Amino acid sequence: MKAKYNIGDIQFKTKKECETYTRNIINSLGCCTINKTHTQFNFFENLLKNHQEYTDKMGTGIEYFYIIKNPLNKKCFHAMIQRTDGSKTDFSWLDCCKFKKRSTKEDLTKAMREAVKFDMIEFKRSNKLICNLCNVENLPYDKYHIDHVEPSFKTLSEDFLKTKQNIPTTFSECKTTYTTIFKDEDKEFKNEWFLYHHNNCKLQVLCSCCNFKKH
Protein backbone atom coordinates (compact mmCIF):
# COMPACT_ATOMS: atom_id res chain seq x y z
CA MET A 1 0.00 0.00 0.00
CA LYS A 2 1.34 3.45 -0.94
CA ALA A 3 2.08 5.82 1.96
CA LYS A 4 -0.72 8.35 2.45
CA TYR A 5 0.37 10.35 5.47
CA ASN A 6 3.52 12.38 6.06
CA ILE A 7 5.39 14.09 8.86
CA GLY A 8 8.09 15.88 6.93
CA ASP A 9 9.86 13.21 4.88
CA ILE A 10 8.62 10.36 7.08
CA GLN A 11 5.77 8.47 5.41
CA PHE A 12 3.05 6.35 7.01
CA LYS A 13 0.48 4.07 5.43
CA THR A 14 -2.11 4.67 8.15
CA LYS A 15 -2.93 7.31 10.74
CA LYS A 16 -2.55 4.67 13.45
CA GLU A 17 0.99 3.93 12.28
CA CYS A 18 1.78 7.65 12.53
CA GLU A 19 0.24 7.86 16.00
CA THR A 20 2.23 4.86 17.27
CA TYR A 21 5.48 6.23 15.85
CA THR A 22 4.91 9.64 17.46
CA ARG A 23 3.81 8.17 20.78
CA ASN A 24 6.99 6.07 20.94
CA ILE A 25 9.15 9.14 20.36
CA ILE A 26 7.36 11.16 23.06
CA ASN A 27 7.40 8.32 25.58
CA SER A 28 11.11 7.73 24.97
CA LEU A 29 11.88 11.43 25.49
CA GLY A 30 9.75 11.93 28.58
CA CYS A 31 9.68 15.39 30.19
CA CYS A 32 12.30 17.46 28.40
CA THR A 33 13.06 20.54 26.32
CA ILE A 34 13.41 20.18 22.55
CA ASN A 35 15.35 23.20 21.29
CA LYS A 36 16.61 23.87 17.76
CA THR A 37 19.77 21.81 18.30
CA HIS A 38 17.83 18.77 19.51
CA THR A 39 17.78 15.79 17.15
CA GLN A 40 13.97 15.69 17.28
CA PHE A 41 13.29 19.41 16.76
CA ASN A 42 12.60 19.04 13.03
CA PHE A 43 10.25 16.14 13.69
CA PHE A 44 8.17 18.20 16.14
CA GLU A 45 8.24 21.20 13.82
CA ASN A 46 6.88 19.07 10.96
CA LEU A 47 4.41 17.37 13.30
CA LEU A 48 2.98 20.75 14.28
CA LYS A 49 2.42 21.61 10.60
CA ASN A 50 -0.33 18.96 10.58
CA HIS A 51 -2.29 20.86 13.23
CA GLN A 52 -5.52 22.48 12.07
CA GLU A 53 -4.51 25.74 13.76
CA TYR A 54 -0.85 25.65 12.82
CA THR A 55 -0.44 29.41 12.21
CA ASP A 56 -2.13 30.35 15.49
CA LYS A 57 -0.15 27.76 17.45
CA MET A 58 3.16 28.90 15.94
CA GLY A 59 2.45 32.58 16.63
CA THR A 60 5.55 34.75 16.31
CA GLY A 61 7.75 31.68 15.94
CA ILE A 62 8.93 28.67 17.92
CA GLU A 63 11.75 29.08 20.42
CA TYR A 64 11.52 25.46 21.52
CA PHE A 65 9.13 22.61 22.25
CA TYR A 66 8.86 20.96 25.64
CA ILE A 67 7.12 17.93 27.07
CA ILE A 68 5.37 17.85 30.44
CA LYS A 69 3.11 15.41 32.26
CA ASN A 70 -0.47 15.68 31.07
CA PRO A 71 -2.30 17.71 33.76
CA LEU A 72 -5.38 15.48 33.43
CA ASN A 73 -3.56 12.15 33.19
CA LYS A 74 -0.17 11.89 34.87
CA LYS A 75 0.56 8.65 32.99
CA CYS A 76 0.59 10.53 29.67
CA PHE A 77 2.64 13.38 28.24
CA HIS A 78 1.59 16.81 27.02
CA ALA A 79 3.31 18.76 24.20
CA MET A 80 3.99 22.46 24.66
CA ILE A 81 5.42 25.34 22.62
CA GLN A 82 7.55 28.20 23.89
CA ARG A 83 7.25 31.05 21.37
CA THR A 84 9.91 33.62 20.50
CA ASP A 85 7.84 36.42 22.08
CA GLY A 86 7.86 34.66 25.46
CA SER A 87 4.30 33.32 25.23
CA LYS A 88 3.52 29.61 25.42
CA THR A 89 0.75 27.29 24.31
CA ASP A 90 -0.04 23.61 24.21
CA PHE A 91 -0.83 21.53 21.13
CA SER A 92 -2.36 18.11 20.74
CA TRP A 93 0.24 15.86 19.13
CA LEU A 94 -2.52 13.26 18.81
CA ASP A 95 -4.62 15.62 16.67
CA CYS A 96 -1.56 16.19 14.48
CA CYS A 97 -1.50 12.44 13.78
CA LYS A 98 -5.17 12.43 12.73
CA PHE A 99 -4.53 14.65 9.67
CA LYS A 100 -7.74 16.57 10.20
CA LYS A 101 -8.84 19.02 7.56
CA ARG A 102 -7.26 22.42 8.16
CA SER A 103 -9.21 25.65 8.26
CA THR A 104 -9.71 27.58 5.03
CA LYS A 105 -7.54 30.38 6.41
CA GLU A 106 -4.69 27.99 7.10
CA ASP A 107 -4.88 26.40 3.67
CA LEU A 108 -5.03 29.81 1.98
CA THR A 109 -1.86 30.93 3.76
CA LYS A 110 -0.06 27.72 2.79
CA ALA A 111 -1.13 28.03 -0.86
CA MET A 112 -0.03 31.68 -0.98
CA ARG A 113 3.39 30.79 0.43
CA GLU A 114 3.79 28.01 -2.11
CA ALA A 115 2.74 30.33 -4.95
CA VAL A 116 5.64 32.73 -4.29
CA LYS A 117 8.27 30.07 -3.61
CA PHE A 118 9.88 30.78 -7.00
CA ASP A 119 10.60 34.38 -5.90
CA MET A 120 12.39 33.07 -2.82
CA ILE A 121 14.41 30.51 -4.77
CA GLU A 122 15.46 33.03 -7.42
CA PHE A 123 16.51 35.56 -4.79
CA LYS A 124 18.67 32.94 -3.09
CA ARG A 125 20.24 31.89 -6.39
CA SER A 126 21.04 35.43 -7.50
CA ASN A 127 22.46 36.86 -4.28
CA LYS A 128 25.67 36.28 -2.37
CA LEU A 129 25.00 33.97 0.57
CA ILE A 130 26.06 36.10 3.49
CA CYS A 131 23.80 36.77 6.48
CA ASN A 132 22.38 40.29 6.45
CA LEU A 133 22.45 40.43 10.28
CA CYS A 134 25.59 38.69 11.52
CA ASN A 135 27.55 38.68 8.21
CA VAL A 136 28.48 35.00 8.48
CA GLU A 137 29.42 33.42 5.16
CA ASN A 138 30.73 30.14 3.77
CA LEU A 139 28.01 28.12 5.48
CA PRO A 140 26.38 25.18 3.64
CA TYR A 141 23.69 26.28 1.15
CA ASP A 142 20.80 24.95 3.22
CA LYS A 143 21.93 26.97 6.27
CA TYR A 144 20.86 30.19 4.53
CA HIS A 145 17.18 31.21 4.54
CA ILE A 146 15.34 33.91 2.61
CA ASP A 147 13.39 36.23 4.87
CA HIS A 148 10.92 39.07 4.31
CA VAL A 149 12.10 42.46 5.50
CA GLU A 150 9.19 44.81 6.25
CA PRO A 151 6.57 44.47 4.93
CA SER A 152 6.37 40.95 6.31
CA PHE A 153 4.76 38.09 4.40
CA LYS A 154 1.74 38.40 6.72
CA THR A 155 1.34 42.10 5.93
CA LEU A 156 1.79 41.56 2.18
CA SER A 157 -0.77 38.75 2.04
CA GLU A 158 -3.32 40.58 4.19
CA ASP A 159 -3.00 43.78 2.13
CA PHE A 160 -3.45 41.80 -1.09
CA LEU A 161 -6.52 39.97 0.20
CA LYS A 162 -8.16 43.29 1.13
CA THR A 163 -8.29 44.10 -2.59
CA LYS A 164 -9.98 40.81 -3.55
CA GLN A 165 -13.59 39.63 -3.37
CA ASN A 166 -13.49 36.14 -4.87
CA ILE A 167 -10.92 34.52 -2.60
CA PRO A 168 -10.41 30.74 -3.03
CA THR A 169 -11.88 28.55 -0.30
CA THR A 170 -10.90 25.09 -1.56
CA PHE A 171 -7.45 23.89 -2.54
CA SER A 172 -5.45 21.06 -4.10
CA GLU A 173 -2.47 19.08 -2.84
CA CYS A 174 0.80 18.65 -4.71
CA LYS A 175 1.16 14.97 -5.59
CA THR A 176 4.92 15.08 -5.01
CA THR A 177 5.41 17.26 -1.92
CA TYR A 178 1.90 16.97 -0.40
CA THR A 179 1.92 20.77 -0.10
CA THR A 180 -1.33 22.76 -0.22
CA ILE A 181 -1.59 24.57 -3.58
CA PHE A 182 -4.16 26.57 -5.54
CA LYS A 183 -6.53 24.73 -7.86
CA ASP A 184 -6.18 25.18 -11.62
CA GLU A 185 -9.38 27.24 -11.74
CA ASP A 186 -7.77 29.78 -9.38
CA LYS A 187 -4.78 30.34 -11.65
CA GLU A 188 -5.71 34.01 -12.21
CA PHE A 189 -5.85 34.68 -8.47
CA LYS A 190 -2.55 32.86 -8.00
CA ASN A 191 -0.82 34.87 -10.76
CA GLU A 192 -2.14 38.18 -9.43
CA TRP A 193 -0.83 37.32 -5.98
CA PHE A 194 2.54 36.29 -7.41
CA LEU A 195 2.91 39.62 -9.23
CA TYR A 196 1.80 41.60 -6.18
CA HIS A 197 4.32 39.80 -4.00
CA HIS A 198 7.07 40.12 -6.63
CA ASN A 199 6.54 43.87 -6.99
CA ASN A 200 6.18 44.67 -3.29
CA CYS A 201 8.31 42.24 -1.32
CA LYS A 202 11.72 43.09 0.08
CA LEU A 203 13.86 40.05 0.80
CA GLN A 204 17.10 39.39 2.63
CA VAL A 205 19.50 36.52 3.19
CA LEU A 206 19.75 35.29 6.78
CA CYS A 207 21.65 32.39 8.26
CA SER A 208 19.39 29.80 9.88
CA CYS A 209 20.44 30.93 13.37
CA CYS A 210 19.51 34.60 12.83
CA ASN A 211 16.31 33.63 11.04
CA PHE A 212 15.19 31.48 13.98
CA LYS A 213 15.99 34.29 16.42
CA LYS A 214 14.11 36.84 14.29
CA HIS A 215 10.96 34.73 14.11
Image: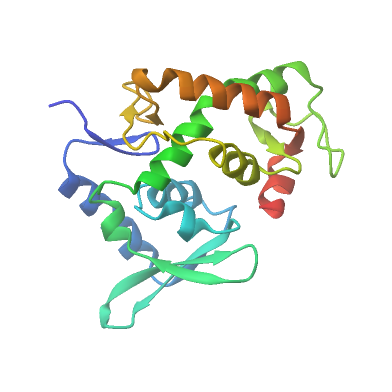
Quadrant housing residue 171 = top left
Q: Pick whichever, 200 or 211, lies toward us.
A: 200
**Residue closer to the observer: 38 or 165:** 165
On the image, the x and y values in percent for residue 152 come to 68, 44
Dividing the image into 4 quarters, which one contains the N terminus?
top left
* Residue in the image at 51% along x and 35% along y: 164
Q: How is the image coloured?
A: rainbow
Asked whether residue 120 is in view, the answer is no
Q: Position of residue 47 (x, y in %)?
A: 38, 49
| Left or right, 51 with reference to 188 | left
> As drawn, is 111 to the left or to the right of 195?
left
Horizontal relation, residue 176 to residue 162: left or right: left
Q: Quadrant of residue 93?
A: bottom left
194 shown above or below 20: above
- Foreground residue among 115 and 32: 115
Q: Is residue 33 above or below residue 121?
A: below
Whole-percent x and y of residue 92?
33, 63
Residue found at x 76% / y 33%: 202
Query: Taking 1 as reference, is 54 above or below it?
Result: below
Question: Residue at 35% of width from left, 78% of height from top?
Answer: 69
Q: Is residue 39 visible?
A: yes
